[in-house]
Image (spheres, rainbow, N blue to C red):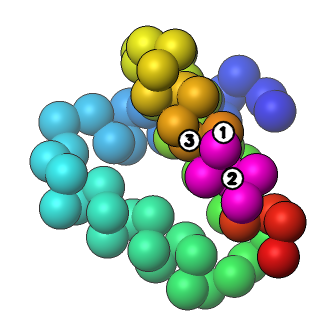
Amino acid sequence: MDFQIREAISANMKGNNATEIRAVVEDAIQRGEEHLLPGLGVFFEKWWNTTDDTKKDAVLNELATAFAH
């Protein structure tokens, strides 16, 4: 992933509240366009870098369950 993408998304999302961020995520998923996937990856990376191991483990278990189907 190119660092310019990270910086652009971070700048565009700065100051957004949870409702606004949810709308962006849901819109990207609903559209299903491949070029939006790196943006969702930036969201995940931001979260990953700022959360504790307990929350990471919980999400990883949920993802493992989701991908098992």
Position of 30 relative to 53 (above/below): below
Q: Decide if residue 40 is on the left or right side of residue 9.
A: right
Q: Answer whether labels 3 and 2 touch (C-beta < 8 Å).
A: yes
* Kind of residue sitting beneath label 3: Val
Q: Give the range drawn in magenta.
A: 61-65
Is residue 21 at all visible to an observer of this figure? yes
Q: Name the residue under label 3.
A: 59
Q: Decide if residue 42 is on the left or right side of residue 9.
A: right
Percent coordinates x, y for residue 45 in the rendering: 59, 29
* Kind of residue sitting beneath label 2: Leu
At x 71% / y 65%, what residue is drawn? 66
At x 43% / y 14%, what residue is drawn? 52
Q: Answer whether labels 1 and 3 touch (C-beta < 8 Å).
A: yes
Kindly identify which numbered label has been placed on residue 60. Answer: 1
Crowding at mark 3 (Cα within 10 Å: few <14, some 14-19, many 20+) = few
Percent coordinates x, y for residue 4 in the rendering: 67, 28
SS at circle 1: helix
Indicate the quadrant containing the N terminus: top left, top right, bottom left or bottom right.
top right
At x 17% / y 36%, what residue is drawn? 15
SS at circle 2: helix
Q: Answer whether labels 1 and 2 touch (C-beta < 8 Å).
A: yes
Position of 12 relative to 11 (above/below): below
- Give how far apart the Cα atoms at labels 1 and 2 are: 5 Å
* Kind of residue sitting beneath label 1: Leu
Kindly identify which numbered label has been placed on residue 63. Answer: 2
Crowding at mark 2 (Cα within 10 Å: few <14, some 14-19, many 20+) = few
Indicate the quadrant containing the C terminus: top left, top right, bottom left or bottom right.
bottom right
Crowding at mark 1 (Cα within 10 Å: few <14, some 14-19, many 20+) = few
